[in-house]
Every structure is written in C-alpha cells, then in structure tokens.
Image (spheres, rainbow, N blue to C red):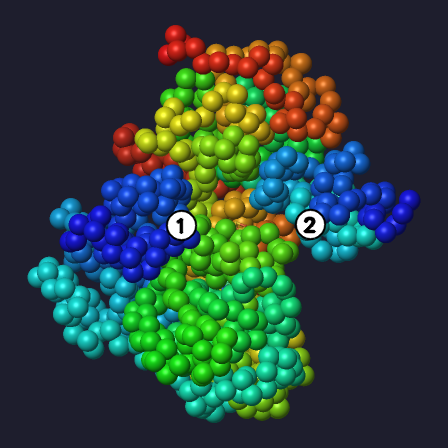
Amino acid sequence: MPNIEEFIGDIFSEIGEAPDLLLQYLHAIQHEYSHVPEEAIQLLSERLKTPPMKINAVIDFYSFLHRTARGEYDIRFSDNITDRMLGNQLLFKSLCKKLGVEPDVPRADGKVTVSLTSCTGICDQGPAMLVNGLVVSKLTEKRIHKMVGRIEAGIPVANWPKSLFVVKDNIRRKDKLLNDDIIKGSAIGALAATGGEVMLERLENSGLRGRGGAGFGSGLKWRLCRETEADKHYVVCNADEGEPGTFKDRVLLNSYADELFEGMTVAAGIVGAKKGLLYLRREYLYMREALEKTLQERREAKLLGKKILGHKGFNFDIEIHMGAGAYICGEESALIESLEGKRGIPRDRPPFPVTCGYKNKPTALNNVETFVAAAKIAVFGADWYHSVGTSQSSGTKLLSISGDCERPGIYEYPFGVTIRQILVDCGASDTQAVQVSGAAGSTIPPQEFYRKIAFEDVSSGGSFMIFNQQRDLLKMVLNFARFFTHESCGFCTPCRVGGRLLNDLVEKVMVGYATRYDLKEMERIGQVMKKTAHCGLGSTAPNPILDTLAKFPGIYATRLHNTSHTPAFDMTKALDVSRLLTGREDEGAYVERTDEY
Amino acid sequence: MNTENTFRLDGKDIPFKKGDTIMDAALRAGEYIPHLCHNPEFKPHGSCRLCVVDVNGRHQASCTLPAEAGMEVDNSSDAIRQRRELLLQMLFVEGNHTCPACEKSGACQLQAVAYYIGMLSPHLTHFFPKRSIDASHPDIVFYHNRCILCGLCVRASEQVDRKSVFAISGRGIDSKLVFNSPDGKLGGSELEFTDKAVEVCPVGAIMPKHLGYETPVGQRLYDTKPISVVGDVAAHSKPEKPFISDKSHE
Ligand SMILES: Cc1cc2nc3c(=O)[nH]c(=O)nc-3n(C[C@H](O)[C@H](O)[C@H](O)COP(=O)(O)O)c2cc1C
Ligand code: SF4
Ligand code: SF4
C-alpha cells in the first residue's frame, strides 16, 4: 500500500486542495486503505486546518467510511426487501459461515469484512452485493462458494471473472424518452439557436416536472435560478438514487450519460452556470470510470469546457463527486451539504437551493431523469413531450420494477398508466400489494390497482415493488422501518427517536408480543413524525406503517397478543439466566395468564 | 395596529420586523412558544421540533419560519399540546434522565417545558442507552446521558467563544456530542468554565464541578414559576462569580 502522506499529496494535486473536498478525500482514502487511518485524519486536519473532531464527525456519518480497517475484501450485501425476497439472508449467513466471520467484524487475519447495506439499486437482478465497490448480481450459493475460494486464495477482485460483475440494463418497455434519440450536441445547438429565454419557455410549455419525487416544475426552477442574481450559479445532478427499489437512474447513467450531460449543459446555458456537479451515490462507484470517459469525450468534442460549440462565453464543465452511503443525501439540501464536504444534515428551507444552494449560490438541482428529459425536449420541442401523459403530469416516467413478477426491469410509460396495466405487462400475478415510490411511498392494495401513476394520483419517484399473496407484508414493513432508523440523519427529535420507536414496535408485532394498544401507539407516533419532522425523510418514514395499518390490518391483527397491553419488557427473557442457573424449565411461572382481554 | 406587519398568534396581533421569525416576534411580544434548541442569540437550529406550530393549516417550526403579514398561527390547540408531549417523551426515553438524582433538577429546561406541557410520565419504552460521563475537565463534568443534541453548545462555542470545542457526530439514533481535543476527552479541549458554551446548555449535560447543590431545592429557577414566565436557562445562567480553575482541585 502506498505511503499515506504521498497518497494524500497525490489526491490534493489531482483534485485540488479545499475544505469542501473533504468527503472526496475521505472516499479516496477509504477506497485505497479500506478505512481512513488515524494518520490520514491528522494529515488532513493539518492541511485543511480543520480539527480532527470535525473530520471524525464526517466519517462517522457515512456508512461507507470507517475508522478501522475492513480488510482486503470489503463485502456488503444489499438488504432491500427485494433482496430478502430473493433469499439474500441465507446467502449472507452462508458466506459469513464459510469465511468464519461475524457480520461487520473484520476477520482476525484482516482479510475480509462482511456487512449488510441499504438497497444498492440492483433489485431487478438481485440478490446483489458489493465487493470492493464492484457489483456482483444474481447471487447464488454456487457463486458464494466460488467467491470464498477466491478470497481464501487471495485472488484480487480485479482478477475475478468479468461475468460476475455484469449489471444489465433490463429495459423492458421504451417510450418517448428512451426511444427518440438525439444527436450528441443537438440540444446545446438548439439552445444556441433559440437563446435562453425561448428555451426556458419551451421547457415550461412542455410541463416537465422533477422526476426525483417532489414534482416541482423544472422550467420554473431554472427560471428562478436564472433570475437570482449572483456572481456564480451552479448546476447539480442528483444521482443519489437511494430510495429502496429504484434503479432507473442507474440505467440512465449507464446508457444515457451523454443525454444527461447534455441536459446539464443546457441547464447551465440557461441559468448561467460555469460549473456542474454530478453527485453519484457510492453504490454506483463502478460506473464512475465510464462516466469520466464520457465527460472527457464531450470535452474533446467541444461540448464541455471553454467556448462550447464555439460560442464565446459559454463555458461549462462537470465534476463527479462521490457520496459515501447515506440515503438522506438524496434530499437536495443534505446533498448540497455533502457536496460541501460536510455531514448530510438537511438545511432549513427557505431559502431553497434554487436561490441559495451549493456554496450559498443559486443552484439548479435536478434528478438524472429530469436532465435527460430536458435535453430531449430542447431538441424535439414542448409538444413532443406533453402530447403524452395527463394534464397535470406530462410526458413519461421510468419505473424500476422489481419483486414478484416475471420480467423485472425498467419500464417507460406515459403518465396515466394504471397499476393494473403495469402488473400485466411485467408478468405479475396473484399480487397482494404494490409498494409505489419506495420505502417512503405508498402501499397499494388490489382494490386500488385501477389507480394511475401520475403526480395527481399515485405519485412515483420510480420505484415499483411487487408482493404476491405468498409474501408476509409485515416483513416489508419491518425492512423499511429498519431502513429509516438506519438512514435518519439524527438531526431532529421526531425522526431520530420516533423512527427507532416505530422500528421497535414493528419488531414487537413481529414476535407476537404487541397488542391493539401498540398499534394505536404506532399510529400516534407516525402522525407526529409526519407533522413535525424537519425534512421529507422523517415525514415519510411512517408511510408504510400507516398505509398498511389502514389497508392491510390483517398483517397486524393475526399477530396480536390477546390482551389490551403487554409491556415491551420481556420478563421471560429477563429470567432466562436465572432459569438456567436454577435448572427450572417452567417459563412464565411468575405470571398467571388470562386470555380474556 | 398596522396589519401590514403583524401576524396573529392564537388570536393576538403580534408585530414583527423584517427578518423576524415567528419565534423572534413572539418572544419579543412576551408570548411563549415552547422550545429547547432555540436561543435568540444564535442562528436557529430547528432540531428539537417543539416549537412546531400550525400556520395557515401547515405545520412549521416557528424558530425558522420567517414571519409574514396576516399569518394565522396556532400555538395552543390540544393537538399541538399532544404533539409536544410526545416529542418531550421521546427526548426523555432517548437518554437517561433520572431527574430525582440530577443536580440540574428544578433548573432544567427539558423538565420545565415538560411541566408546562403537562407531561406526566415518559410513557414510551425507555431506550436505556449506555452512555458515559466525562469528568476529565478540571471544572466541568459532561453527562452524555442527559444531552438532547440541541446543538446550542456547538453554536455558542463556534460563534461566541470562537473555539469549536463541540460537534455532533455519528448518524441517527447513534448521534452524539464529541469534543475537540487530542484524546477526544473534554479535559484536553480549550473549554473554560466561563465560556458561553457552558452557559447555554438547557439540560444537565454540561455541569460545573466544585459547586454542588448551591441552590436548594425549592428555590431553583423553575421551582416557583413556570418556564413561560421565567424564560430559558441560558438567560439566567451567567455564573455569578466567574469560576477560575484552581489546579489544587485536581
Ligand atoms: C429523504 C429524501 C431522499 C431523496 N432522494 C432523492 C434521490 O435519491 N434522487 C433524487 O433525484 N431526488 C431525491 N429526493 C428529492 C430531492 O430532494 C429533490 O426534490 C430532487 O432531487 C429535485 O430534482 P427534480 O426536481 O428533478 O426531481 C429525495 C428527497 C428526500 C426527502
Ligand atoms: S427528518 Fe430530521 S432526523 Fe430525519 S433525516 Fe430529516 S432532518 Fe434528519
Ligand atoms: S450538551 Fe447541552 S447544549 Fe450541548 S447539545 Fe447537549 S443538550 Fe445541547
């Protein structure tokens, strides 16, 4: 391994020296050394004039940064509910056993650490894992077995068979956005021909709304950004795609990167930005090299850099910034904090990023899909786009479909498509529920399958997870409750504490200790989170619980303890040791049970 | 009253100046909105969420929401009281708050707000987290058990003391307060007893050494009057005699 001081020196000369690049340095160091060694923290502290405390606080915030070594092979199993439905738990246990490791604990020889991690966005070809940042999809016992052999033999991941690391696009249905190709540079050319104002009108007329979930009008956003006076403006692409079950940005980044960068460049031309940033989730590190290559090709083709397409004064370039494992960094203001090298704590809004964003400058921040759509609208016009969709949701939407269906993958539909139609198309049968828009979304029962995907009906950021009648839906609820507890940034009381309380209550239901009273508590805590949380994470975290309590009461009722109240404290368990010591086997002898209430 | 720069809080007209938040204007007008992480001397944080009010039917933190003319602000409905009670209960069960054994009892803002709201018990399941006590500083003991992560010490140390002794680290329920010192202990930090950061803590997390039980029970800050009348801990906690560390204590 290289000398740390030299390594840090090299990163500094490569990407520059500034405190807001802290997270980028930490990412690079983590990747090289499988942790951020104490020596590196001291060196960074000296050079950035930041106390080690603050650097540690950043490291301890992000799931992919560590202060102790994880070893030569750093393995993380994706633990979304869809991975679980495909059997990731057995494979996880099997790998741990074969390697002789406890979860999260590095093996004594320092060779390997195995952990679970939040959804990695490979739900259509799970169960999936990351090995030193590379994706292994479609895990099987056979793959695990061979993997153990390679690890024990010390074969570097770079020399593992390439076939292990294949991630397919799985595009199953194309519509306007994926079908109608644009020639490289044509959107920028269209902007140059029309000028910013006309292009803005085109976007506004197209009715394009943000594809990251909130659905804010993209034309209006860019206009506000353009009209906010400042010495600098920025364009930021949100490629954090952390919502469980979403993987459509993965496919766009893989196969439509040119269109994405084209869209960002059009945005830059409109708002007057010289610099753009792509915030790429750490789970998608494996795509970085190809994305950098695309950027380089665009620079060589004069589509990025100085005097774009020969237009004097049109200067714009894009940098890729890595995330480090934090769902909250998909929230726009937390993302900006993270871009500035800090912990991803959402800012107060207002002011919104559009007037006061990255480095407190006006920032046009959009989802990957939004930029791709904007590039095509720039070329084909507003009518091309809003000729499909509904009156309030124009155009099309990419859905990431996973779970119980024959053909999981990417489906592009005009807005207004019914859930029933989607289920038919992807080969789902005997469906019990669909979770639309991820863990934070809504749980849809069969009697609502007539509903439409649209901002005014069932809104979706892109995730569409299917559960058939054989599934235990409470497992989904528990998986999501754990996800939110793990991903809460911890800033505000209702989400930090309430999320954990909800998680514990769902667990109580799961083991059959909960009563009707506990269900009321879940409802009460959930409502307070919705009303008081500082950001969208905390206010949507109770959704799967509240939705299933209302629409799938059976998954709770069948497990309830038949009393009005049972304490969370488990007396029987607490007496385990005493019983063992005294050789008694009369569990529950301390209480007279009545099942009348 | 000029309605151009007033809003209504529970039916009363509250005047405000440009740049005021709901909280700023309400406090100036002598109206109490329960809060823990707010202190008018510092940039608002908005993390405890106790001050969430209903503004034109939407739920908003009054410490961060800019006041606007004509707003209808509800700060006293029963629904709001119940929300606040639950938030307080969350704070109580998250840490280890054994009030009868805490020296801050009676002069603690968490406790005082809980009395004001009418919280009778913590109600929720206690987390009983394992948290430590840091007694490495010559003049100060730090009780992680009682820290509610309001970030006031962080802001005071940064903005007033210009030392950045404190930061919040970790994520989610594992968030915790950390110190800027070579070994991570408070003793090695630049914190001094007279620092603003020591004054602002609303609970019994940052406690003086050598000054045990100076004020008898019954005469403490909130013993006779409620917090809505008395105000914040920070407004009263300027140490009477600046305490200079005496090395002979060590
Ligand atoms: C907890 C949370 C996570 C989010 N994650 C993402 C994400 O991964 N990708 C995304 O584009 N937007 C995400 N958003 C929405 C963003 O805050 C923001 O609205 C969006 O990126 C704006 O782009 P758009 O207008 O193109 O949709 C998230 C929001 C919240 C509250
Ligand atoms: S709701 Fe609060 S704790 Fe949860 S992620 Fe948002 S700011 Fe953080
Ligand atoms: S120590 Fe006190 S002031 Fe600092 S964060 Fe904790 S409760 Fe707030």
Asked if residue A192 lies left or right of residue B189, the reply is right
Specify the quadrant of the image occupied by residue A245: bottom left
Residue A443 is situated, as x and y percent measured from the top left of the image, at: 54, 68
Q: Quadrant of the N terminus of chain B?
A: top right
Q: Nearer the viewer, residue B224 or A557?
A: B224
Dot 2: what SS? loop
Q: What residue is pinned by disc 1?
A: A19
Q: What residue is pinned by disc 2?
A: B65
Specify the quadrant of the image occupied by residue A122: bottom left
Residue B158 is situated, as x and y percent measured from the top left of the image, at: 51, 36
Cα distance in 3D space between marks 1 and 2: 30 Å
* Residue at (54% x, 49% y) in the render: A495
Q: Nearer the viewer, residue A113 or A235?
A: A235
Mark 1 in CB contact with mark 2 (< 8 angstroms): no
A255 vs A440: above or below: below
Residue at the limit of the structure toward the front, as seen here? A312
